Amino acid sequence: MVYGPHTPADRERMLAALGIDSVEQLFSDIPEAVRAADLRLPGPVSELTLARELTSLASRNRVDLVSFLGAGVYRHHIPATVDAVLSRGEFYTAYTPYQPEISQGTLQAIYEFQSLIAELTGLPVVSASHYDGAAATAEAALMTVRATRRDRVLISRAVHRHYIDTARTYFAPGSRAIEGLPTAPDGTTDLAALEAALAEPGRPVAGVIMGQPNAFGLLEPMADAAALAHAAGALFVAVVEPVSLAVLSPPGAYDADIAAGEGQPLGIAPQFGGPYLGLLAASKPLLRQVPGRLVGRTADVDGRRGFVMTLRAREQDIRRDKAASNICTNQALCALAATAYLATLGPHGLCDVAAGGVAAATRLETALATAGFERVHRAPYFNEFAVRVPGASRVHDALLERGVLAGLPLAVWYPDDLELADALLLCATELTSDEDIERLVEGLIEVAA
Amino acid sequence: MDLPQTLRYSKDHEWLRTEDEEGVVGITAYAADELGDVVFVELPEIGRKLQKDETFGVIESVKTASDLTAPAAGEVIATNDALVDDPELVNSEPYKGGWMVRMRLDDPDAGTELMDAAAYSESIGS
């Protein structure tokens, strides 16, 4: 039997009901340039030919670089246990394996993931994960709108650029507004501007979103910002990097209502475009505003421990138009990687990873300063900071030729900011060696001269 | 099916009890039975002005979730805080402890536009 969900007649009827002429019209919101045109797939080839072709494509990836690129994605050592757990057949299974009678392993792993992220963030409610940090941040912004019944969200310009863009996309339809907050000269969010924006008459704010560390790698005055937000009846969202939470104050400790972030640093290798892992945690009163899957612990009829999906009435397959989100799913396999990573390292191991990055970044700063390259901002940093390098973009390209990936020219994210035209955002982790730092600094001296 | 004669009923299975210029709103025993065990009731903030048929909250059961719609226009002056910890009151005492909001009615006679017990009983086929 041919599997055909819709006959041409079915399609005609649906198009007529929608009042449109073609299926293509349904995709009119997607810019022409990124729409899949005629795919023109080549014909079948032998396995040998295909393997050669794919190997040739894969070899275009540069895996030989000495990398100082962070900018939201961080290189860390991934213990062998992570891949060993991930590649077990019991976990490597069909999409949405949530039937409790047959999926206790998967459900328990997700429950443990939630518990670990709750411990890291200091917030009691954690979703089973989202697409990535950008999606989680945009969902957090929407949560503040639903919970406060207000429609104006403030987001610091020092939140990751892609997260801001994604949140703006989510906010584009309808009456909701998302507005940027400026930064002060030290690179942290301008709290006076925040205070003024919160006090604008007749324009109540639903949520305030700031990064910790922020997009420049700097540490923000989160407790002060949270207090300002709360005094104005707004919720406070912290966009966090999970490894840093081993040594930084967790969002729950500075009264953040929601924490969002990218879970990639937890055992997921840097990959162009993902798959990554969106983290989303919230305070108890926001429980029913949390989008996506939640797994809970319960007992079966015989009193034995069991794990099930819970609070399902928030979800899109149950409530459709009234769901907490219609644009999310979880990343079960990536969440499993994060769970295996955290379980392998334990709290002390994660502290070591975080401290290793801080120490390497400090050595990097010292070496750069000695060579005459100064930081752009004065605020304290975690493992990443911006350095002033004349002709940053050109220097970046020249170093790439020499096998050194000199972070991110900040002009890519802030093309209109002259202060950042000559800034390179550089990151160090526990993988950054003194030899790596030497190669970068030597390269900078030669190329920038 | 328990349908007190003193109440008025909406097609959305809410009941309205008028007390002078105020109205108390809940859902009927029929609706509570259809929903099954209620696990959560989301109620509006005090002071919110509601139009007739406007959604003012959500009721969640183990089976599903439904919107709560105002059977009459008015301003919310109280909500039933007991439902926060004991949402199952909606099942056990739908017309007493399971009440949801108290409103100051725009029109104290708004109840006359709703069904009486007999008409509602007929509408649900009981």
Image (cartoon, helix red, strand yellow):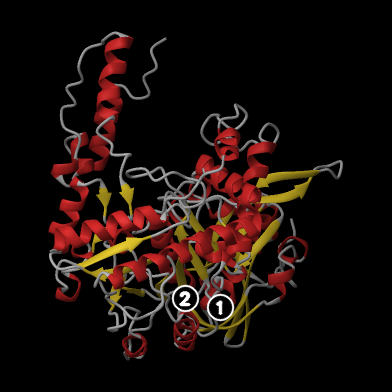
Q: Chain of mark 2?
A: A
Q: Residue A255's mark?
A: 1
Quarter holding the N terminus of chain A?
top left
Look at label 2 and name its amino acid. Phe
Q: Is residue A308 left or right of residue A312?
A: right
Judging depth in this view, the residue of B15 and A109 nearest the camera is A109
- Taking depth in this image into account, of A302 and B53 the one nearest to the observer is A302
Residue at 25 percent of width and 58 percent of height:
A442
A216 left or right, relative to A305: left
Residue at the disc numbered 2: A236
What percent of the width, then of the height, locates residue A364?
A: 37, 65
Q: Earlier in the sequence, mark 2 or mark 1?
A: 2
Residue type marked 1: Asp
In the rendering, at what x and y percent does residue A220 appear? 42, 78
Q: Are marks 2 and 1 in contact (CB under 8 Å)?
A: yes
- Mark 2, Cα crowd under 10 Å, few <14 / some 14-19 / many 20+, is many
Which of the 4 image quarters holds residue A437?
Answer: bottom left
Do discs 2 and 1 share a chain?
A: yes
- Secondary structure beneath label 2: strand
Q: Which mark is residue A310?
A: none
Above-or-below relation of B19 to B4? below
Percent position of residue A235, x then y: 47, 76
Label 1: few (<14), some or many (≥20) within 10 Å? many
Considering the numbered disc 1 on the image, is that residue within a helix, a strand or a loop?
loop
